[in-house]
Amino acid sequence: MKPIVKFDVETKSSVPIDYGSKAYLNDPYADLKCMSYKVGEVPTKLWVPGMGVPHFFLAPQEYMFAAFNIQFDQRAVNMLGRKYGFGNIRLDQCIDIMAVAARYTFPQKLATLGKVLKVKLQKMRRGTYLVKTVCCPPFKYTQAEFEELCDYCVRDTDSMAEILSLLPADHLSPEEQRIWVETAQMNAVGVPVDVKAVRQINRIVDWYTGDKMKRMPFLTDGEIDTVHQRDKILKWCEGYGVEMENFQVDTVAEAVLDVEERLLDVFEDEAVLRGYGKVLEVLKLRQLLGGAAVKKFKRLQNMTLNGSIHDNLRYFGATTGRTTGGGFQFLNLPRAKVDVPEGSTHDIEVEKVLDKFRDASIIDHDDPLGEAKKLVRPMLKVGDDQTLMVRDWSSIEYVLCMWFCGEQEKVKAFAKGYDPYIGFATKLFNVRYEDVTKDQRQKSKPPILGGQYTLGANGLIGYAEGYGVFMTVDEAQFSTNTYREDHPLVKTTWYELQDTAVAAVENHRRPFSTHNTKFIVEYDRTGRHWLILTLPSKRTLYYCEPFTGLGKYGKVVKHKGINPYNKQWSTRELNISRLIENIIQALGRDILQPAVKRLALAGFSPRATVYDEIICVEPLLDSEKRFKEMEKIMCIAPSWAPSLPLFADGYLSKRYMKG
């Protein structure tokens, strides 16, 4: 490998960094403030504007470059360093220390990662203050503060260099590096946005919310100004005997129901009735105006540069290797969608709703913000001579689980077009396959999708609500029992996986296998030990410092990892539920990433992935033909599972929608 230059840049801009690095760096006032760099064991050096350009950056093609979240640093050097004589750093020359850390499930924040690895040079706490003072408007700072920022920059490079030496490897494998580059390229190109529509919706939303917000001071006697004053609202409600542990959507909804019930009981007490009435209106204003969905329009407007939003993907955002969201966050867009009557199209109906925002007649609607929520996805829109090509694999986790667990009859049935949800509905509702209703099919989804990951009756009730399915305890228990009786090899696989993982952890360096999956505990170059899970695809998953202990149902593997709820590095349990889910979702990733590569080689332009969905922006000419070609490319079975049946549904549209 070429010599590695570790470096860090500090930049200034009048655009907030949370608008995205593209918008931030394209600001006319954007500039390099300083840069630190280190090669080998030579002490880290500092560069500031006015100094000669270090030779590593004059001829960068001779080197590899490493930085934490290097997509920003590489872009800053290429865009802002040009006027100083810096050469261009290619993506394939980049080593993203954040990506290497993610590959081994370590935290993806520099300060947190430094603490976990116990580096000698921790990230300076004062760094945030220095960046805000020196690099952000109004740019008023002392020479001493600038020099301190330079020291902070040098310290970051020293810390990164130490971190890189403490990770299991100092670079990604060639295949993972290719996927990282592919992801970074999609981030750089971006996804097109209907900017005019976004701005108009923001105007209407701002006026409407501002008008409604005027009620808050009136209702609370001036104690609360907006629905966003969380602590004040919680305390104010508590004064009326309405207590809430938090301000989450479900908690507020429960409080609304509680207050509505109380109102029925106190109709004779005018004072109490009036108090509860105020509380109810405040909570409903919070529900109406405090939702995150309409804030997406602000984010879209702020992040859009030259008609596109960028940096929407995070490489290896999950333990399984799945790409997760960044920037605009495609992964948590509202489920609400515009109704499309028979004989019409999605794009036509979206335009009808948009027209009401354009002429402001939407203000007379019962729920303008609800209508706005339906338009979040459609704001992703291509130009007149282009089309969106969007496809995802049908029931991919289901068929992967059946294949992995050896339920071959179900795999064969799926290959012949058998719908697993309709099939399961025949057992739940005792009806013929051809008589299953749409509602019955929907009710069959949660028991299958949750059931294959060990979900029991109690967990199924809450899980099903996410699909709009409401179950009694008896219904959930019957669904769970039916699933396990109908999928005996899935249930067997859970325990075989757990027993194999436990055996590997209790017998270091000795391999144990089941279901074409190998478990072994090995030690890295730093002496840290890992449970390494080799998938049927031959890719590996890593679990840090594993040991065995007692779980809810017996002996289980535990390990160090990031708690998904509080984002802290702590002990996690690799129970059978996580184990089977990790494997299946990881295999899904190993189908998606090669498909993205094949599409690019075939001349397609992938712009983003969302779970198992691929979004391409393509020319309108011959789009139907190319859309069919996209399906064929995506449905090529992987070499490690040549008999796996794959089907890819999707749509052609000017605007993005929920498929």
Image (spheres, rainbow, N blue to C red):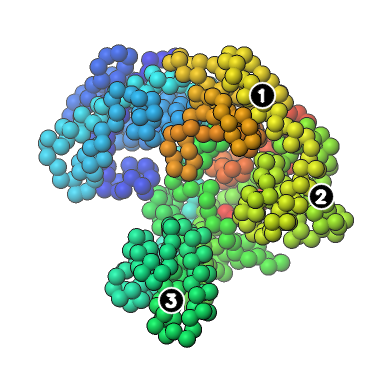
Is residue 509 rendered to the left or right of residue 195?
Answer: right
Residue in view at x 81 percent, y 57 percent: 429
Measure the alpha-carbon separation of dots 2 and 1. 32 Å
Q: Nearer the viewer, residue 206 or 633?
A: 206
Q: Which residue is mark 1?
A: 500
Residue in view at x 17 percent, y 33 percent: 148
Above or below 114: residue 617: below
Are there few (<14), some (14-19), or many (20+) residues within 10 Å of tag 1? some
- The amino acid type of the residue labelled 3 equals Tyr
Residue 68's image quarter? top left
Examine the rendering and report whether any part of residue 410 can be seen: yes
Could you say where residue 330 lies in the image, as x and y percent from the top left?
A: 52, 48
Q: Viewer-nearest of labels 3 and 2?
A: 3
| Residue 292 badge | none
Q: Earlier in the sequence, mark 2 or mark 1?
A: 2
Measure the alpha-carbon separation of dots 3 and 2. 49 Å
Residue in view at x 57 percent, y 44 percent: 610
Q: Earlier in the sequence, mark 1 or mark 3?
A: 3
Residue 348's image quarter? bottom right
Residue 501's image quarter? top right
Q: Which residue is mark 2?
A: 423
| Residue 276 badge | 3
Examine the rendering and report whether any part of residue 361 can be seen: no
